[in-house]
Image: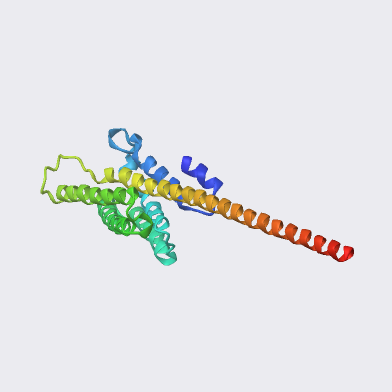
Amino acid sequence: LLALAFWFRERRDTTLLWFAITTFGWAMAAIPWTHGIVASPAFSHGPLAFAMRFAYAAPMLVLCLRIAGKRWLWPEAGLWLFTLLGLVLVSMLDEARQGSIITYWSVAYLVALTLLLLVLARSQRLEHTWASWMFANAVVLVAVLNLHDLAWWMGWIDYDSLTLSHFHIPLVLLAIGTAIVNRHFHAVAAVIQAKAELEARVAEKTREIEANYARVQEAEREKTLAQERRRIM
C-alpha cells in the first residue's frame, strides 16, 4: 500500500507499481488459509494452487528488470505466456501431473530470478552500495535454500524435514526494497546538490550583474563630468 501510494504520486516510474504487485502476490500466497490443514482442498492442487504459488513470480521478475533499468519487450511477453501456459496445463492435466508442472515451473522461475539477481548485483546502479550487498545475500540465500529443497526432493536428506525455498522471497523483496530506497536517496541527494549548485550560480551571476551595474554607473558619471567640462570650456 505504501509503494502504491508513492507510485500514485510519480506514475512515470513503474518500479513501485511492480513492487506493490509483487509484495501483494507474496502476501496472498503466504497467508495461512492457503497452506496446511486450514487450507481448502482447492488450494492444494489445480489452477488455484498454481495461481497462488506463482502470483508473485512473474511480477517479481519484471520488477527485477525495472530495477536494472531494462525494458525487454519480448522476454517479458514470453514470461507472461509461460505463466499462462502453466496455468492452462494445470487446468487440463490430472492431479498427478499437476505436481510435475508446478515443479518444472518453480525451477524455471528460480533460475530466471537467480540470473536477474546476479545482473542486479553487478549493475552499475548498485555498485559499491549497501543495496548491492543485500542483493548478494539474497542470491546466496536463494541458492542455499533451494539446494536444501533439491536434496529433500531427491531423498538425500530426511523427507520429513521442512521445505525452505519459499523463505528466500522476503529477503529478495527486502533487497529490492533497499534498491528502491537507495535510488530515492540518490535522487534526493542529486536534487539537493543541483539546488546548491544553482544557488551558487545565481549568487555568482548576481555579483556579476552588480559589478556590471557599478561599471555602468561609473561610466555614466564620467560621461556627465565630461559633458560638464565641455560646457564650462
| Residue sitting at x 38%, y 55% | 64
How many numbered marks does the figure carry? 0
- Residues 130 and 99: in front is 130
| Residue sitting at x 61%, y 53% | 202
Note whether 227 is above or below 31 in the view shown. below
**Residue 211 visible in image:** yes
- Residues 230 and 100: in front is 230
**Residue 51 visible in image:** no
Left-right relation of 12 to 51: right
* Rendered location of residue 92, percent (x, y): 34, 56
* Rendered location of residue 225, percent (x, y): 81, 60
* Rendered location of residue 215, percent (x, y): 70, 59
Q: Quadrant of residue 35?
A: top left
Note whether 232 is above or below 195 in the view shown. below
| Residue sitting at x 52%, y 42% | 5
* Rendered location of residue 15, percent (x, y): 45, 52
